[in-house]
Amino acid sequence: MEDVIKLFAVMMAVTMPAVIGWGIYAWIANYSKRLKAGRSSLSSQEVEHLLTRVEELERGQRQVLELAERLDFVERMLPSLREGKALPK
């Protein structure tokens, strides 16, 4: 079970930042294409959409950090449980 938890943690630690990074990369690539095409300004709807998307990505990143903290806690507690010690209250 411990191996599964560690594998899940590694997968989350690698996947989530990669997804967030890919989203940012795609946005930058799209924006640079627009600049090269001569369209240098975004409409208010596009700006609002991008701001919403950035908020979603930041929320996801916070969730990943919280999960990483929880996993670290569990990993620190597992050796105590194996030794038969009681959990701290």
Image: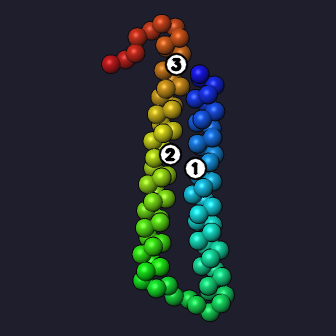
Task: Answer with left or right where residue 9 lies relative to residue 84.
Answer: right
In the image, 5 versus 32, the foreground residue is 5
Q: Earlier in the sequence, mark 1 or mark 3?
A: 1
Label 2 sits on what residue type?
Val
Position of residue 41 relative to residue 78, above or below, is: below
Pointer 2 and pointer 1: residues touching (CB < 8 Å)? yes
* Residue found at x 44% / y 70%: 51
- Residue that badge 3 annotates: 78
Marks 1, 3: nearer the viewer: 1
Pointer 2 and pointer 3: residues touching (CB < 8 Å)? no
Residue that extends furthest to the bottom in the rendered view of this protein: 38
Label 3: how many Cα within 10 Å (few below 14, some 14–19, many 20+): some
- Residue that badge 1 annotates: 16
* Residue found at x 63% / y 46%: 14
Q: Earlier in the sequence, mark 2 or mark 3?
A: 2
Position of residue 20 relative to residue 85, above or below, is: below
- Residue that badge 2 annotates: 64
Label 3 sits on what residue type?
Leu
* Residue found at x 59% / y 63%: 23
SS state under label 1: helix
Label 2: how many Cα within 10 Å (few below 14, some 14–19, many 20+): some
Position of residue 67 relative to residue 82, above or below, is: below
- Distance of label 2 from label 1 (alpha carbons): 7 Å
Label 1: how many Cα within 10 Å (few below 14, some 14–19, many 20+): some
Q: Earlier in the sequence, mark 2 or mark 1?
A: 1
Label 1 sits on what residue type?
Met
**What is the number of the mark on residue 37?**
none
SS state under label 3: helix
